[in-house]
Structure formats: structure tokens, C-alpha cells
Image: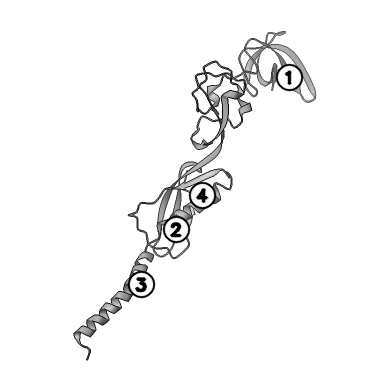
Amino acid sequence: MMNLKSTSNTLLAILFFAIPTLCHAANNAHQSHQSIMDAAEQYLMQTVTHHASNAIIKITPLDHRLRLTHCDTPLETFSPPGGSKAGRTSVGVRCQSTAPWTLYVSANVGLESPVVVAIRDLARGQAIAKDDLKLQISDTTHLLRGHFESIDEVLGQTLKRTLRRGQVITPSMLVVRKTVKRGEQVTILAATGAIEVRMRGKAMKNGNPGDVIPVVNLKSKKKLQARVVSDGLVMVD
């Protein structure tokens, strides 16, 4: 018969060898945070960077207290209703096994592009020169007022207000040049099929191509609504 001391030693030996197995099983009982984050990142890489190769994806780490049952089937990923594909966003990750769960992972998708910025302070009313500007790679998802990706787009344009060094130039900062100015003479084009009739007129409002403005036929004095086509030319649809 085995004595008490031998029995205790045997139990200790069994427990010693069982601890690693028990710990491994305990770890496998929960889905690893890294696997969830990897699934969310892979989803964004497939859905966002496929259309925008300049996308930078950052996944927000999960709360360390979160414990989810290990999924014995591949994780599924999806976009929440109304979810954004740029800026602050989230990805749905779910498990469809015997113990199902769904989780929303936060992320940030930045779209980096060259943008035009000022390299010195510029005064209101100043015409922009090439030496005033540079291109800088920036995250454009936060530039809600727009931006320019080419220096040539803003050369020679006039500033509406003071611009600080390092500031991104947006369309609202520039004086809009009107193709047609109020009070100036324009050519009114009326076309029906292959027949075109041109008349002299006067613009009653400023306008750029595509704008519909009131004009007056200088001969008949009749007021018309015409679409601005180009400099000095409007068309009656």
C-alpha cells in the first residue's frame, strides 16, 4: 500500500505537469485581442486602401478587461450602418459559433496627400507667388473646407484674409475670380438644333461657368436667364 508521503509526492507531480496545460486551456478560452484587431485592420485594408492607396490605418487597442469566448469559426467583419470609410470609424467583428458575440472596433483611417501650404505669413489682398508656397504631405480627412494639391492652382490668386506660415490654403481663403462680371457686355447664344443666334447683352450679376445669371438683350431690352459658358459668353437654354 502506498504511504501518505508517496501519495502526496505523486499528486504534486501530477499538478506540476498539469499547470501548463490548464493555463494554456484558460488562455484559449478567450479570443485574443490581437486576432480581433487584425481582423478589423484587414477589413479596412481591403475596403479602403483598395480605393485609396494613400490610406493610413490605425486600430484603437481594445480594453484590457474585455473577455470574449474563443471563436471556433473564422471571425466575420462588416461596416456598421452609416459607417464612414475615412477619419474616425469603426468595424464590426462578430463570431457566429455556438457562443456568438459581436464587437465594434474603433479605428482611424487617414488619407495622406500633398497639400499646398504657406511657407511665410501672407497679408490680406496679396497676390500669391510661387516662393510663398510649398507642398506638404498631410492627412486630408480633417481638411473639411477643401485643399489644393498643386501649387499652380493658386499661383497669382488674391488672398481674402491674412494667412499664417504653415497654414493649409483652402478655396475659401481666395478671392473668387468671376468669369462674367455684373454690368459688362456679353454675347448671348441661343441655339436650336443646328441653328445658332448670337445677340449682344449685358450681365446683371457675376457668374462663373455653369452659373445661371440674369442678362438683358441690349436690342430688345428683354431680360433673360442665361448660363455662363466662358469669358463673355452666356447661353440661353
Quarter of the view holding residue 67: bottom left
- Return the residue at label 1: 190
| In contact (CB < 8 Å): disc 3 and disc 1 | no
Mark 3 vs mark 1, CA separation in Å: 87 Å
Q: Earlier in the sequence, mark 3 or mark 2?
A: 3
Mark 2 vs mark 4, CA separation in Å: 14 Å
Is 46 or 124 nearer to us in this picture?
A: 124
Image coords of residue 74 (percent x, y): 48, 62
Residue 222 position (above or below residue 103) = above
Q: Earlier in the sequence, mark 3 or mark 4?
A: 3
Give amino acid for label 3.
Thr
Quarter of the view holding residue 70: bottom left
Mark 3 vs mark 4, CA separation in Å: 36 Å
Task: From the image, state whether disc 3 or disc 1 is nearer to you.
Answer: 3
- Return the residue at label 2: 35
Number of other residues with Cα within 10 Å of mark 1, as a class: few under 14, some 14 to 19, many 20 or more: some
Task: From the image, state whether disc 3 or disc 2 is nearer to you.
Answer: 3
- Return the residue at label 4: 44
Q: Secondary structure at mark 4?
A: helix
Give amino acid for label 4.
Leu
Mark 2 vs mark 1, CA separation in Å: 66 Å
Mark 1 vs mark 4, CA separation in Å: 51 Å
Q: Secondary structure at mark 1?
A: strand
Give amino acid for label 2.
Ser
**Which label was assigned to residue 21?**
3
Number of other residues with Cα within 10 Å of mark 4, as a class: few under 14, some 14 to 19, many 20 or more: many
Task: From the image, state whether disc 2 or disc 1 is nearer to you.
Answer: 2
| In contact (CB < 8 Å): disc 2 and disc 1 | no
